[in-house]
Image (cartoon, rainbow, N blue to C red):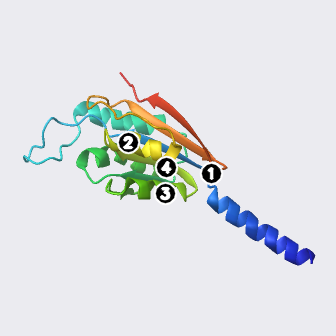
Amino acid sequence: MKKLFLSLFVMFGVTASALAADSTYYVVRHAEKQATDLSGGDNPVLTEKGVKRAAHIMNMLKDVPIDAVYSTETYRTVMTATPTAADRGLPVKLFTTDDLAGFADMLKAMRGTYLIVAHSSSTPDLASLLSGENLPKLDESDYEQMFKVEITDGVAILTQFQTTFE
């Protein structure tokens, strides 16, 4: 009887912990981008200031144990994510904003600490999906907002801070 009770207790404990993964998400918009794509397309790279901001984000998270780095598939987001990923020896994992709710659900099902780089509209949307709080879109000129969402025992805490460096 004790073995059955212990087995059920362990099984329930594993299931409950899987459902309430303790995780932290740093969600940030890409850094400053060139006004236009040099090839005439809609995929510009970062400006010199943007490259500096990407390095600053890496330094802001220097003591944070990042498990994975995610970015949308544009040059500006990948370039923003790369310094942090390279510093940790991690690849930049690409995602699409086509199903942001599905991506948020995938993230919430994983335990760990993540950096996610997106865009002026999808950054607050993703932070909203992760935290349960309604956040406004970022202004097109705002490159400084970072959202930290900590989920512990199924309870989300949202903190907003800036990546100001000059």
> Which residue is located at x 18 percent, y 43 percent?
44
Kindly identify which residue carries mark 2: 123
Residue 25, horizontal then vertical, whole percent: 50, 45
Which of discs 3 and 4 lies nearer the camera? The answer is 3
Label 1 CA crowd tier, 10 Å (few <14, some 14–19, many 20+): many
* 63, 78: nearer the viewer: 78
Q: Helix, strand or loop at disc 1?
A: loop
Looking at this view, name the residue that lies furthest to the top: 166
Task: Give the residue type that dot 3 points to.
Answer: Asp
Kindly identify which residue carries mark 3: 105
Label 4 CA crowd tier, 10 Å (few <14, some 14–19, many 20+): many
* 110, 46: nearer the viewer: 110
Q: CA distance from mark 1 to mark 2?
A: 21 Å
Task: Give the residue type that dot 4 points to.
Answer: Tyr
Earlier-in-chain disc, 4 versus 1: 1
Q: Helix, strand or loop at disc 3?
A: helix
Residue 12, horizontal then vertical, whole percent: 74, 67
> Which residue is located at x 81 percent, y 74 percent?
7
